[in-house]
Image: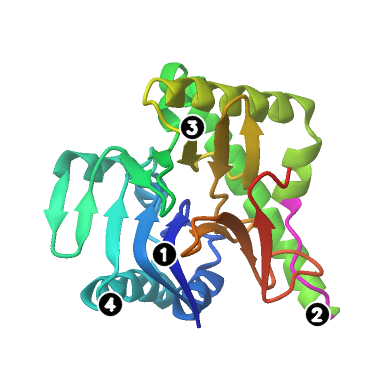
Amino acid sequence: MAHWRTGWISDFHLGMKGTRAGMLLDFLRENEFERLYLVGDIIDVLALRRGIFWPQEHNDVIQKLLRKGRKGTEIIYIPGNHDGLVAGYLGTYGSVTLQKHAIHTTVDGKRILVFHGHELDTVVQNLGWLGHAGDLGYTVLLRGNGVVNLARRLLGLEPWSLSAYVKGRVRNVAKFISNFEEAVVRYAQDYDVEGVVCGHIHTATVRKIGAIEYYNTGDWIESCTALVETFEGTINLIRHAGSREGAGDLDREPAGAR
């Protein structure tokens, strides 16, 4: 069992086929936090509108989070664009606080802005119909993941993400990710912070852009990643076992690694 001062996880997309809820549940069982930020797109309301999909593992994830809260973990839930309905219920409910964004202070005094990130995604913000078209295309790729990984399991191979492979090799996607990261950093500068944590684009990253440390939590569909703060104040990106070929139990990628 690993113990962390703080954790940041996002983009579970519970209610959507392709979510790696089993790996997420293992991660939650194997890691404890004093404070845990849920950085948006936890429950995929948009997917549920297209058809109800809610297996037991998805329910188990929610129950595990609530148990962590009852046992003393402070949980801060920041809605994204796929679970935006809960943004109308900001406030504190037992051990869970819902808020639009947060300012986290690390043990060594650094201020970190935390928000989902969809607010700066011009596709979602200004071209809603195109954003939904992108969601549908992504869903098709995720179904491809299922077919590919069924074959890989039969061959005794580790899971591999077709959607991540395609995303990493499309020039326009790479340009969008770069523009998004720079927009997030510009936005964070208005908050007088040293760093910013977001999710949304399913691209786990730790890098410095100008004077701001940029952290992206990744997701629990492709990368199975989280950010954690040690009790010394270091923020690491960790990847859960099985999320990619050659992964160990938890791969750690320290700040500034990219």
Question: Between 227 and 147, which is closer to the camera in this rendering?
Answer: 227
Q: Is residue 221 left or right of residue 164?
A: left
Question: Between 215 and 143, which is closer to the camera in this rendering?
Answer: 215
* Pointer 3 or 4: first along the chain: 4
Residue 130 visible in the displayed image: no
Gap in angstroms between the C-alphas marked 2 and 3: 34 Å
Residue 153 visible in the displayed image: yes
Q: Residue at x 40, y 45 (%)?
A: 109
> Residue flagged by tag 4: what amino acid is it?
Arg
Where does residue 88 sit, x and y in percent of width and height? 17, 39
Gap in angstroms between the C-alphas marked 1 and 4: 18 Å
> Residue flagged by tag 2: what amino acid is it?
Leu
> Residue flagged by tag 3: what amino acid is it?
His
- Which disc is residue 154 wearing? 2
Question: Between 190 and 247, which is closer to the camera in this rendering?
Answer: 190
* Pointer 2 or 4: first along the chain: 4
Magenta residues (range): 156-162
Q: Residue at x 56, y 44 (%)?
A: 216
**Residue identified by numbered label 4:** 67
Question: SS of the residue at dot 3?
Answer: helix
Quarter placement of the C terminus = top right
Above or below: residue 39 compared with residue 213: below
* Mark 4 Cα-neighbour bin, 10 Å: few <14, some 14–19, many ≥20: few
**Residue identified by numbered label 3:** 132
Above or below: residue 247 compared with residue 142: below
